[in-house]
């Protein structure tokens, strides 16, 4: 694991949304359960949520809000996909979210190929999703890009060669993106466990040891300060 993290950290000038926006124009966003409860924020209404994001950006003179890795959230309570009678509640986020308006270009983090893609169209899911496969310094791993628009899946082919910085998609609007305020869910995955076009982006407390190892912090790669 340590060797893999060092490989991620060695990569430079990595961006996954709109290459013209400097990291100086990013601001952190806290969506932890404790914080959203204090705000009394309605997480079930995508439009209210989008206005909240826009106000947060405006108040901080920023263009992108980011955060959420290993954050425990109430955001998923509205969807039965994250808890039912036979499973523990999945409410710990294991990717990094980048909140910016729909239609924003999504970029490949690194050289690779298209592993798979599909529309995960349940409420609260990713919506249109693309997974890239990478091989760097002896490490094979994947990056996942969720909450895209439907057009992003057009003309895509498995095995298609992708270069770092290529525009691979645009962000989707609600409800196509899983019914969220527009944002990119970006995740690094060591082992896809045989999944195609999808991989959990949220886990339960009992699963955190496995998923925090299998899905390391994307900011090791992005280096957003």
Image: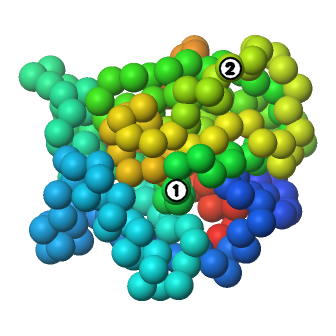
Q: What percent of the width, then of the height, locates residue 62?
A: 55, 78
When the figure is inspected, residue 160 is found, relative to residue 146, above or below; the finding is: above
Number of disc labels: 2
Marks 2 and 1, Cα distance to the nearest angstrom? Answer: 21 Å
Reading the image, the residue beneath label 2 is 154
Circle 1 residues within 10 Å: few <14, some 14–19, many ≥20: many
Q: Which image quarter: residue 41?
A: bottom left
Upstream in sequence: badge 2 or badge 1: 1
Q: Element under label 2? A: loop
Q: Is residue 10 left or right of residue 76?
A: right
Q: Which image quarter: residue 114?
A: top right
User: In front here: 114 or 20?
Assistant: 20
Q: What percent of the width, then of the height, locates residue 162?
A: 85, 32
The residue positioned 27% from the left and 39% from the top of the image is 90
Please identify the residue farthest to the left as the structure is shown.
85
> On residue 140, which mark appears?
none
Q: What percent of the width, then of the height, locates residue 80?
A: 19, 28
Question: Does the image show residue 209?
Answer: no
User: Which quarter of the figure is the C terminus placed in?
Assistant: bottom right
The residue positioned 33% from the left and 64% from the top of the image is 51
The residue positioned 17% from the left and 39% from the top of the image is 78
Q: Element under label 1? A: loop
Question: Does the image show residue 70?
Answer: yes
Circle 2 residues within 10 Å: few <14, some 14–19, many ≥20: few
Q: What percent of the width, then of the height, locates residue 37?
A: 14, 67
Reading the image, the residue beneath label 1 is 101
Q: Is residue 50 left or right of residue 60?
A: left
The residue positioned 46% from the left and 50% from the top of the image is 182
User: In front here: 100 or 97?
Assistant: 100
Q: Is residue 81 left or right of residue 195?
A: left
User: In front here: 50 or 137?
Assistant: 50
């Amino acid at each position: 694991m340590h060797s893999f993290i060092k490989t991620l950290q060695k990569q430079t000038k990595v961006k996954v949304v709109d290459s013209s926006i400097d990291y100086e124009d990013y601001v952190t966003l806290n969506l932890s359960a404790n914080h959203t409860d204090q705000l009394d924020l309605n997480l079930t209404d995508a439009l209210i949520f989008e206005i909240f994001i826009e106000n947060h950006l405006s108040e901080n003179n920023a263009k992108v809000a980011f955060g959420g890795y290993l954050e425990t959230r109430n955001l998923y309570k509205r969807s039965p996909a994250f808890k039912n009678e036979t499973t523990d509640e999945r409410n710990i986020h294991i990717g990094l979210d980048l909140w910016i308006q729909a239609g924003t270009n999504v970029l490949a983090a690194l050289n690779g190929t298209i592993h798979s893609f599909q529309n995960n169209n349940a409420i609260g899911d990713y919506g249109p999703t693309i997974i890239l496969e990478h091989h760097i310094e002896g490490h094979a791993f994947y990056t996942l890009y969720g909450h895209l628009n439907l057009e992003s899946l057009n003309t895509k082919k498995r095995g298609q060669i992708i270069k770092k910085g290529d525009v691979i998609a645009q962000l989707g609007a609600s409800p196509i993106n899983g019914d969220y305020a527009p944002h990119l869910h970006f995740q690094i995955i060591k082992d896809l466990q045989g999944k195609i076009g999808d991989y959990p982006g949220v886990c339960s407390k009992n699963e955190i040891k496995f998923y925090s190892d299998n899905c390391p912090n994307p900011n090791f790669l992005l280096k957003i300060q």
